[in-house]
Image (tube, rainbow, N blue to C red):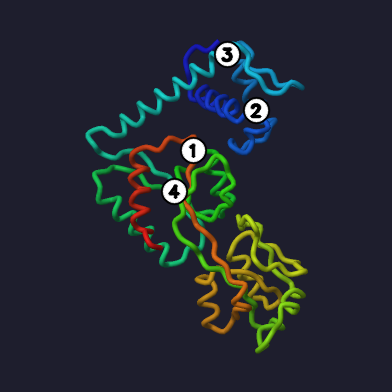
Amino acid sequence: MLGQLHDLDLQLLRLFVTVVEAGGFSAAQGVLGLSQPSISQQMAKLETRLGYRLCSRGKGGFRLTEKGELLLQATRALLLQIEQFRQQANGVAGRLLGTVRIGLAENQDSSVTLRLAQAIARFRQRDETVQLELTSAPPAELERLLLEQRLDCAISYFSGNQAAFDYQPLFEEPQRLYCGQGHALFEMTQMNREQLLDTDQVRHPYRFLKQGEPFQSRRSSALAEQIDSALTLILSGRHIGYLPCHCAAPWEAQGLLRPLDPTLDFSVQFTLARHRAQAPGEALLAFVEDLGAAFAGA
């Protein structure tokens, strides 16, 4: 039986609500970013703290007990009261308070960096005392931090398939296929698609594209999760691969990279992602508004 309510209890109660809303332990894995054994262990911990069983999870599927149903109603009411209190406290005297934690994709174009800076400048003109925390990471890491609710929002390229997120398009980033100096294709004045298909291409598991890159060669002996790593492999002159045009531009200007078939160019949609279960505070909503204004027409 619970005595005093601790932070750990609140974490376990939030997990309990998420499991119920997802429809079971297995379905909740993607939302929580946790393995099924880990979810089961934490649910067992909550049941031990409470002193009664919350659900059955056997061959008949996931089902709440009567006490579990009552706890679900009480927990939802508690979490709503906590969020209402937090929003009211943060909005005292109309001043924006608290912390806004923002995730950013790495290797941003300078124009994107400038727009982000403009959004921050607009936000700082408000009546606010807000701690802004910026974190740069690959898309997979940003998605994990969002799932764990360790970020309030993130700007990157995502698949858009994560049911736990809301997505707001911001801008597109052009991508191009390149080879490096010393590659067999580098000096060719004409090349055909068959020659490209036989080249060794860098694969990019860091990309969150629904349909993958528009060109895939028959061979790949190189894997790169980050743009800098892909660039290094392409500059070796032994691989071709996709790069954001702005990242390749200075190397192309030095004559060290060459763009290949322009019909294979494509663009990556960058979005602002937020966790649906994470109620936004006034400070975050204000920052998102300023962000939208900075990227309007991008």
Tell me the distance, in whole angstroms, between the alpha carbons under discs 3 and 2. Answer: 20 Å
Quarter of the image with the C terminus is: bottom left
Tell me the distance, in whole angstroms, between the alpha carbons under discs 4 and 3. Answer: 36 Å
In the picture of the structure, the residue carrying the numbered disc 3 is 50
Q: Residue at x 42, y 63 (%)?
A: 112
- Mark 3 / mark 2, whichever is N-terminal: 2
Mark 2: amino acid: Gly
- Mark 4 / mark 2, whichever is N-terminal: 2
Mark 4: amino acid: Ile
Q: Where is residue 23 in the image (x, y as percent from the top left)?
A: 63, 28
- Among all residues in the image, which is located at the extreme left? 93
Mark 1: amino acid: Arg
- Mark 4 / mark 3, whichever is N-terminal: 3
Secondary structure found at label 1: loop
Secondary structure found at label 3: helix
- Mark 3 / mark 1, whichever is N-terminal: 3
**Quarter of the image where one finds residue 110:** bottom left
- Mark 2 / mark 1, whichever is N-terminal: 2
Q: Where is residue 10 in the image (x, y as percent from the top left)?
A: 50, 24
Comparing marks 3 and 2, which lies closer to the viewer? 2
Q: In this view, does 110 lie to the left or right of 27?
A: left
In the picture of the structure, the residue carrying the numbered disc 1 is 276
Q: How crowded is mark 1: few (under 14 residues within 10 Å), some or many (20 or more)?
A: some
Q: Is residue 85 above or below residue 283?
A: above
Q: Residue at x 77, y 22 (%)?
A: 59
Instruction: Return the residue nearer the eye: 189 or 233.
Output: 189
Q: Residue 102 carries which label?
A: 4
Q: Residue 24 carries which label?
A: 2
Tell me the distance, in whole angstroms, between the alpha carbons under discs 2 and 1. Answer: 18 Å
- Mark 1 / mark 4, whichever is N-terminal: 4
Tell me the distance, in whole angstroms, between the alpha carbons under discs 1 and 4. Answer: 16 Å
